[in-house]
Image (spheres, rainbow, N blue to C red):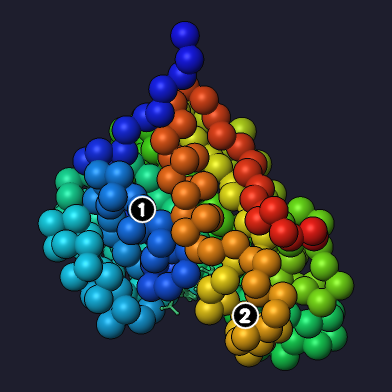
Amino acid sequence: MPAENRTLKETVIAITGASSGIGRETARQLVAAGAKVALGARRLDRLEELVLELGTENAIAVQMDVTSPADNKELVAKALSAFGRLDSIVANAGIGHYGGISDNSDEDLMNMINVNFAGTVWTVRAALPEFRKSHGGDIVIISSVAGLRGGADEAVYAGTKFAQIGLAGSIDRELSPEGIRVTAICPAGTKTEFAIGTGRTEGDAALDDYMNPSDVAFQIVTALQQPRRLRTGLWTTWSMAQTS
Ligand SMILES: NC(=O)c1ccc[n+]([C@@H]2O[C@H](COP(=O)([O-])OP(=O)(O)OC[C@H]3O[C@@H](n4cnc5c(N)ncnc54)[C@H](OP(=O)(O)O)[C@@H]3O)[C@@H](O)[C@H]2O)c1
């Protein structure tokens, strides 16, 4: 018998980095699939705009910084108090300062490590007590193809994305016996605000071949819809036009 998609109706999903790009599109597609969403990011005005679009019965905005363990706990606490449960967390917040190993300023370098890697760890740790209580839950980590192969002009960025893959593989082994599922999604270049001004230029012809954030969001939603008896592991995605 073929497996059937798992319904996301009435499930509750928290998303970090929901104020733009992939996170915002994921929120839209999840609500369209019947889920409730808790939206986390620093820019509250953007989150509130999205809540108005999605409906206050379907979404809440939580101003938070992923580098703060307390803010991540607050995102989870607010999801629970608004919707009564938490089924999944999407650790999506990220920044990209491209450059070779000597090019990034000390501050930009530490910010990338703190947001992309430490932030993911704090987000996962914040959701875990709830998932353990319910003996279930989905953790989706948004890494990158840069986290699988590296890149000459993105040494530290790629390092943080490799670190997310190492984290995902390890917690998959640690948590799957408890019924908690871990997926790492590795998109190739996607047309978002990401890295514009710090490695990418608005209007650059190379962006024409990139995916849209809705393409990556579709993959995140599809991963969450997999039957719960399946572990979902590592996903990659490119547009047909992208070669590397
Ligand atoms: N675009 C690409 O080509 C591409 C390719 C592969 C992987 N990715 C990954 O996809 C993820 C999403 O990026 P995107 O392309 O959608 O870029 P984006 O449009 O720039 O979105 C990044 C999101 O992260 C949030 N964020 C950044 N720092 C944060 C912090 N300290 N605390 C909380 N939220 C923070 C931003 O919100 P605020 O600024 O409001 O806090 C924003 O909502 C990232 O992890 C990125 O590494 C992107």
The dot on residue 195 is 2
The residue mark sitting in front, 1 or 2, is 1
136 above or below 100? above
Q: Quadrant of residue 62?
A: bottom left
5 above or below 127? above
Q: Indicate left or right for 97 with 65 as reference.
A: right
* Residue depicted at 32% across the width and 33% down the height: 7
* Residue depicted at 79% across the width and 58% down the height: 243
Question: Considering depth in this image, is 12 or 77 the residue closer to the camera?
Answer: 12
Q: Quadrant of residue 72?
A: bottom left
Tell me the kind of residue under disc 2: Ala
Some atom of ligand 1 lies within 8 Å of the CB belonging to the residue at label 1: no
Question: Considering depth in this image, is 19 or 73 the residue closer to the camera?
Answer: 19
Q: Indicate left or right for 62 with 20 as reference.
A: left
Question: Label 2's element?
Answer: loop
* Residue depicted at 75% across the width and 86% down the height: 104
215 above or below 1? below
Quadrant of the drawing holding the C terminus:
bottom right
Question: Label 1's element?
Answer: helix
Q: In the image, residue 134 lies at what x, y percent?
A: 31, 33
Callout 2 crowding tier (Cα within 10 Å): few <14, some 14–19, many ≥20 = some
Some atom of ligand 1 lies within 8 Å of the CB belonging to the residue at label 2: yes
Q: Provide the residue designation for mark 1.
A: 29
Q: Quadrant of residue 42?
A: bottom left
Give the Cα separation between the discs numbered 1 and 2: 24 Å
Q: In the image, residue 10 lies at what x, y percent?
A: 22, 41
The dot on residue 208 is none
* Residue depicted at 17% across the width and 50% down the height: 83
Callout 1 crowding tier (Cα within 10 Å): few <14, some 14–19, many ≥20 = some
Question: Considering depth in this image, is 77 or 82 the residue closer to the camera?
Answer: 82
Tell me the kind of residue under disc 1: Gln
